[in-house]
Amino acid sequence: MMENSNKQPVSTNDHMVEKHQESGAGLSRREFSRLGAPVLLTLASRPVFGGNCLSNMMSGNLSDPDRGECGPGWSPGGWKAPGGSEPDWSKTPFEYGSYASNNTYTKQNGSQQACGANKQNEWECYTGGTTLAQALGYHGLAVPGGLSGVANQTLRQILFENTGGSTGNFAGHFVAGLLNASHSGITYILTPQQLVDIYNDPSLIPEPYTGDFGGFMDSTWI
C-alpha cells in the first residue's frame, strides 16, 4: 500500500511477494567498511545533516552509544527487479507496477514485443507504479529542480532509462537512494530529506566524495 503526502492510500501492491529481509541493515561500521564504503568512516569538520546515522558518524563523538549504525542499501541495478526477492519493493511505501500480460512495447531495434504470460522480468510489461513526484510527496518533499524532467515518470522507468549519470542527472542513483531510505528493513545512511539536500547542494557531500553525487551514492550500497 502506498500513501500520498497526506498519508492517504494511493494504490495496493498486491503482486509483490513478501520475502524475509536479509539485507545489510544493522551491520556494524566495521562490517560496512569491508563492503567498500569508506565514506561512512570519514569524520567531517562539521555535522552537515540534521538526522539519522550520517550526521552522528560525522559528529566526531565515536563514544556516543546512541549514534546509530547503518547498513548499505541496494544499487539501481538491484532495484530494477520487479519484486519477489531482495530488494523487496513491498517493504517500501511505493509500487513497482502491475504486470499486464496484454501489453506490447517497442524494443530498441524498433520491433514490437508482446508481453504474454512469462515476461515478468520486462519492465515495459508493467503499468501504473509510483512516480518520483508521488514518492517524494509521500515524505513531504519537492522534486529537485535537476529532476523536474522525470518527476512524472515512474520509479521503475527512471531506474531503467536514467541509469547512473548517463543522462547527466543521476536520476537512477537518486531513485535508488530514495527507495533505500524508504525501505522498512534497511537502516540507510541517508534520510529522504538528506538525499534531497545533497542532490540540490553537492557541497554538502562529505569527503572524499565532495562534489560527486554519483560517487558518493555508489559508496552507500551493495
Image: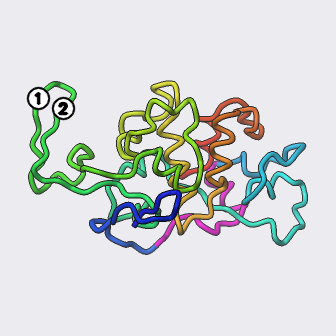
Name the side, left or right, on which 101 lies relative to 81: left
**Residue at coordinates 65% horizontally, 40% vertically from top-left?**
216
Q: Is residue 169 above or below residue 173?
A: above
Residue 31 counted in the magenta span: yes
In this view of the protein, which residue sits in the foreground, 200 or 208? 200
| Label 2 with label 1: CB-CB less than 8 Å | yes
Q: Main secondary structure of the magenta part?
A: loop
Q: Which quadrant does the N terminus fall into?
A: bottom left
**Residue at coordinates 32% horizontally, 70% vertically from top-left?**
17
Q: Which SS class for mark 1?
A: loop
Residue 210 spot, x, y in % from top left? 74, 33
Q: Quadrant of residue 85?
A: bottom left
Residue 33 spot, x, y in % from top left? 69, 54
Q: How is the image coloured?
A: rainbow
Name the side, left or right, on which 197 lies relative to 19: right
Disc sitting over residue 200 in the figure: none
The residue carrying pointer 2 sits among few (fewer than 14), some (14 to 19) or many (20 or more) residues within 10 Å by Cα, namely few
Residue 174 counted in the magenta span: no
Q: CA distance from mark 2 to mark 1?
A: 5 Å
Residue 66 spot, x, y in % from top left? 81, 70
**Residue at coordinates 51% horizontally, 24% vertically from top-left?**
168
**Residue at coordinates 23% horizontally, 43% vertically from top-left?**
124
Q: Which SS class for mark 2?
A: loop
The magenta segment: 21-36
- Residue, disc 2: 107
- Residue, disc 1: 111
> What amino acid type should be assigned to the residue bearing mark 1?
Ser
> What amino acid type should be assigned to the residue bearing mark 2?
Lys
| Furthest residue toward bottom | 20
Residue 112 spot, x, y in % from top left? 10, 33
